[in-house]
């Protein structure tokens, strides 16, 4: 599977602009971490693109339904296992570095996006680690974002939280235009 194949699946099942942008943000973070860890960038990026592709159509069966669909389309068990592991309730342990990274960047990408959207210029370049940490403490801000997943993700990945936020923000900056976060 290549990026075009993954995009075809993503856009077949996902119509929401915000979910598509989230997929692109997670793809960028996964690609950047793959490069950082000297791993397969294309494979990691595909996992980022596809991790939530089934959510809009099958919210109550996500990500298990997505895994079934991907299996039918010949996607490897390695990629499907990483995707399943990004949801604690799936019961699938995060054993690979790719799975741990997906878990670590998923909720954080959404949170960084939320922080960016409340900035005066809505520009990702204006978001600082300090701002993200401050907003994390405000339970009413982006209340649906699971803060425990964000902190647990960095811990499981074994990275300093502030450095992780900075790394993911920089990765997302590479696709800021696509994300609508570079006015």
Image (tube, rainbow, N blue to C red):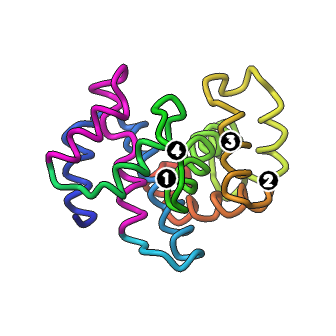
Q: Element type at marker 3?
A: helix
Tell me the quarter of the picture where residue 69 sits. top left
Q: Name the mark nearer the viewer: 4 or 3.
A: 4
Magenta-colored stretch includes residue 68: yes
Q: Please give the residue where the numbered disc 4 appears in the rendered image.
A: 93
Circle nearer the N terminus (4, 2): 4
Mark drawn on residue 58: none
Q: Which residues are magenta?
A: 43-72
Residue appearing at x 80%, y 56% in the figure = 162
Q: Position of residue 39 (x, y in %)?
A: 48, 75
Residue at x-position 53% and y-position 49%: 94
Tell which tag, 1 or 4, sits nearer the viewer. Answer: 4
What residue appears at the point 22 percent right and 62 percent down from the top-left corner? 4
Residue linked to disc 1 = 25
Q: Secondary structure at mark 2?
A: helix
Which residue position holds label 3?
150
- Precedes in sequence: disc 4 or disc 3: 4
Quarter holding the N terminus is bottom left
Percent from the top left, x then y, of residue 164?
Answer: 71, 58
Using the numbered discs, state the Cα–Cα distance from disc 2 to disc 1 in whole angstroms: 17 Å
**Mark 4 surroundings within 10 Å by alpha-carbon count, few (fewer than 14), some (14 through 19), many (20 or more):** some
State if disc 2 and disc 4 touch (CB < 8 Å): no
| Number of residue marks | 4
Q: Are marks 4 and 3 in contact (CB under 8 Å)?
A: no
Q: Residue at x 80, y 59 (%)?
A: 160
The reply to whether the magenta stretch includes residue 38 is no
Residue that numbered label 2 is attached to: 129
Near mark 2 (Cα within 10 A), the count class, few <14, some 14-19 or many ≥20, is some
């Amino acid at each position: 599977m290549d990026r075009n194949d993954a995009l075809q699946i993503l856009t077949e099942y996902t119509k929401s602009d915000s979910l598509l942008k989230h997929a692109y943000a997670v793809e960028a973070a996964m690609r950047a971490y793959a490069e950082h860890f000297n791993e397969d960038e294309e494979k990691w990026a595909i996992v980022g693109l596809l991790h939530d592709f089934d959510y809009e159509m099958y919210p109550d069966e996500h990500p298990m339904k997505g895994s079934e669909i991907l299996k039918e389309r010949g996607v490897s068990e390695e990629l499907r296992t990483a995707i399943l592991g990004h949801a604690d309730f799936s019961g699938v342990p995060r054993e690979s570095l790719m799975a741990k990274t997906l878990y670590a960047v998923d909720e954080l990408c959404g949170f960084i996006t939320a922080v960016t959207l409340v900035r005066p210029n809505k520009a990702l370049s204006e978001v600082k680690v300090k701002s993200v940490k401050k907003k994390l403490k405000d339970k009413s801000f982006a209340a649906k974002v699971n803060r425990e997943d964000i902190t647990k993700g960095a811990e499981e990945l074994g990275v300093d939280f502030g450095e992780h936020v900075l790394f993911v923000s920089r990765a997302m900056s590479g696709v800021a235009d696509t994300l609508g976060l570079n006015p």
